[in-house]
Image: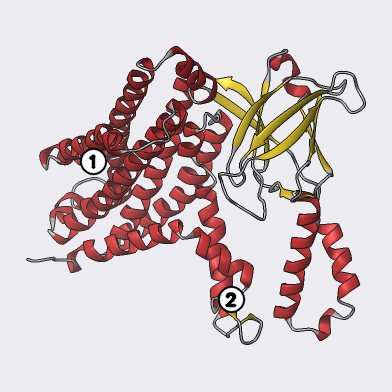
Amino acid sequence: MKKVLAIAGLTWKSAFRYRLFWIMAALLLGAVVGLPLMLKDDGTAKGLVQILLTYTLGAVSTLLGIATLWLSCGTLAKEVEECQMQVVTVKPIARWQIWLGKWLGLLALDAALLALAGAAIFALLQWRSGRLPAAEQKILRDEIFIARAAVRYHPPDLSGEIEKRMRQRVKDPAAMDPATLAEIRQQITGDVRSSITEVTPGHRRRWGIDLHSLRERLGGQALELRVKFHTANPDPDIRYLTGWIVGPPNSPQQVGIEQRLPPDSFQEFQIPNVLDDKGILWVDFLNPNETSLSFPMEDGFELLYPESTFGVNFVRGLAIIFCWLALLASIGLAMASFLSFPVAAFASLGLLLMGLSSGTLSTVVEQGTIMGYDSAKGGYSHSPIDLVIVPAFGVALKIVKLVESFSPVDSLSTGKSVTWGELGLAVAQIVLLLGGVFCVFGIICFTRRELATAQGNV
C-alpha cells in the first residue's frame, strides 16, 4: 500500500502545483455564496431554504462532477502522451498500483473539496435560518432541518389481474403481431393501475401501513402524511377539498381531517399516531369533489416520521454525492487507460449524458421502438434496428437506475432521511459494483497497453 499511497500523494501534489485545488475551491465557494444572492423564492422561509439546498448542492455536484471527469482523464492520458508515465512504469511498481493510486488521489481531492463546500452550505443555512422570526424557524425545524424517514404503502401484485384480462381479450396470442400484443398489454396495465390509483367523486380509498416494528420508537408522537395526486385540470392555483380518516376502521379512535390541497405537487400535513392492535396505521381518503383524483403508486402516499438530526442527514447526503464522484473518477481513468485525452474526455462525457437521459431510455424501452408514434398508422413504428437498440437501451436503463435511485439533494431539501441503509446500498451499487467494473476494466487495459506507442507530441 505504500506504493499506492505514494502515487495518491503525487496526484494530490500535482493538483496543488497546478493550482487546481484552489481554483475549484474558489468556484465552489462562489457557487455557494453567489447563488443565494440571485435566487428568487416564494416568499416563505421554507421555500427559500429548499431552493438554497437544491441549487447549492446541485451546483456543487455539477462542478465537482465535471472537474472529476476532466482531471481523471487528464491525469493518466496526459502523462502517457507526454511520456511521464513511461518513466514511472520502469520503476519497481505494478501498473495496477499506479492506477489505484491515481484513483485514491482523486477521491482524496474530491473529499476535501466536497467537505469544504458542504461546511460552507451548512454554515450558510444556519446563518440564514437564525435571522428568521421564531415562527418561521419552527417551521424549518419541523419540516426541513430534520431527518424524516418514509414508509411507503406496498401496492398489491397486479400481474395476475393483468394476465387474466389479457387472456379475456386475446384468444390466440400466437396469431397476433408482437408489437400489437405489447400495445394491448400496455393498455390493460394502464387500466388496472388506474382502477387502483384513481378515486372517483364520492368514493374512497384506503391505505394500511404496517408500523408494528416502530411502535415503541414512535411512542405517541404525531406523524406526517406526504401525498401527491393528479387531476384532469393540473392548475396549481386550484385547491381541492380532501377528507382523511385516520385510525382503525369502525373504531372510536378514528380522527377526521380536512385539507385543501393543490394537484401535481407534494403536500405534507400532520396526522395523529393511532395504530390498531397489530401496529397498522389505517388511512382512508374520501373524495368530495366533482372530479376524480389519482394518487400515483410510486410516490402518491408516504408516511413520514422523525429518524435523525439534520446534521447527520446532511453528512449522509454528502457521502452519497461522494459515491457519485468516485464512480465518475473510475469512468474517467478507465477511458484514459486506453484512449488519448480528447477521446477519453469525449467518451466519459458521452457516458455521463447517457446517464442523464434516463427518460429517453425509459420511453424507448416502454414503446419497444426508437421510431416513435406514427399518427398515420395509428400506432408505433418498428424497424429491424429495434431488435438491437431496444435490448441495449434496456440494459443501459437498468445500469442507470442503480445510480439514479439515490437522490440525496431532493431528500435533504424536503427533510426526508438519507438512511444508513441507503448510504450502504449506494456504496455497494455505485462504488463497489459499477465503479468496481470500471476499475477492473481500466486496470486491465492500462496493464496491457504498450506505452511506447503513445509518444504524444515528441
Horizontal arrangement in the rendering, residue 389 relative to residue 329 (left or right): right
Residue 163, x across and y down, in percent? 85, 64
Residue drawn where x is 89% and y is 28% of the image: 249
Residue 241 image-quadrant placement: top right
- Within 10 Å of the Cα at label 2, are there few (<14), some (14-19), or many (20+) other Cα atoms? many
Q: Name the residue under label 1.
A: 7
**Could you say where residue 138 lies in the image, as x and y percent from the top left?**
50, 16
Q: Which residue is drawn at 16% across and 61% down?
A: 81
Q: How is the model colour-coded?
A: secondary structure
> Comparing marks 1 and 2, which lies closer to the viewer?
2
Furthest residue toward left: 458
Question: Which residue is under mark 2?
Answer: 369
SS at mark 1?
Answer: helix
Residue 206 sits in quarter = top right
Direction from residue 223 to residue 437 in the image, left or right: left
Identity, as a three-letter code, of the amino acid under mark 2: Thr
Give the residue type that dot 1 points to: Ile
Which percent across, then down, holds residue 271? 71, 23
